[in-house]
């Protein structure tokens, strides 16, 4: 297994992975289709360069990824990370890939002096089982305010 940061050189492998993920579990995806041109454009867009995706690859094929970004509070200097997405293809689950992706992510957090990370957990049996094995974490039911500014 190797880990790579998503970029212009491996974007097609990432797109191929998304197509598989979308065909297997469309109900878990955040989009209805794979927008290949949009993804390729976002890879070059400076705004999206603030988001990191670590790809897990086996035999040259992307089988999982974790996506996150860092941000901080000017007032107190607290540095945080938000995990946008973690997903492993069905055929590769229960092999420790998601845990390894989190380890790679946490190493990046340590390198960047991040104080804390968080994510909004999926609410399903597999997610509960996965996150229930994390050490030294707090699982909470946090109220969230969300306002869509653009559809």
Image (cartoon, rainbow, N blue to C red):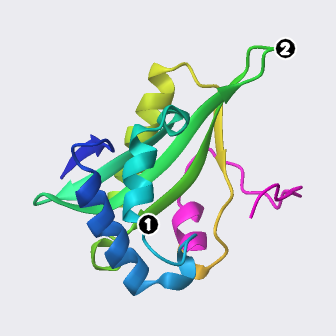
Query: Magenta stretch?
Result: 127-151
Instruction: Judge the density around disc 1: few (<14), some (14-19), many (≥20) Cα neighbours within 10 Å.
Output: few
Residue 11's spot in the image, x, y percent? 29, 52
Q: How far is disc 1 from disc 2 in space, using C-alphas?
A: 38 Å
Compared with 94, 150 (above or below) is above
Disc number lying in front (1 or 2): 1
Q: Main secondary structure of the magenta part?
A: loop
Residue under label 1: 35
Quadrant housing the C terminus: bottom right
Instruction: Judge the density around disc 2: few (<14), some (14-19), many (≥20) Cα neighbours within 10 Å.
Output: few
- Mark 1 / mark 2, whichever is N-terminal: 1
**Is residue 130 in the magenta section?**
yes
Q: Using the rendered view, name the quadrant where residue 118 is placed.
A: top right
Looking at the rendered structure, which numbered label has been put on residue 75? 2
Residue found 12% across the figure and 57% down from its top: 60
Viewer-closest of 121 and 36: 36
Residue found 57% across the figure and 62% down from its top: 131
Camera sees residue 95: no
Q: Using the rendered view, name the quadrant where residue 87 is placed.
A: bottom left
Q: Marks 1 and 2: CB-CB under 8 Å? A: no
Residue 4's spot in the image, x, y percent? 26, 42
Viewer-closest of 99 and 2: 2
Left or right of 149, for residue 52: left
Residue found 41% across the figure and 48% down from its top: 41
Residue 21's spot in the image, x, y percent? 38, 75
Residue 100's spot in the image, x, y percent? 35, 50
């Amino acid at each position: 297994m190797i880990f790579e940061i998503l970029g212009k050189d491996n974007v097609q492998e990432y797109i191929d992975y998304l197509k598989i993920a979308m065909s297997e579990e469309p109900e878990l995806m955040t989009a209805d289709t794979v927008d290949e041109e949009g993804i390729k454009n976002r890879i070059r867009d400076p705004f999206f360069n603030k988001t990191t995706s670590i790809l897990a690859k086996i035999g040259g094929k992307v089988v999982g990824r974790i996506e996150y970004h860092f941000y901080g509070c000017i007032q107190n200097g607290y540095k945080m990370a938000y995990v946008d997405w973690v997903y492993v293809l069905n055929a590769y689950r229960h092999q420790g890939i998601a845990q390894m992706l989190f380890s790679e992510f946490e190493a990046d957090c340590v390198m960047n002096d991040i104080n804390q990370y968080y994510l909004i957990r999926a609410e399903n049996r597999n997610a509960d089982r996965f996150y229930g094995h994390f050490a030294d974490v707090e699982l909470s039911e946090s109220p969230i305010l969300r306002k869509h500014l653009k559809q």
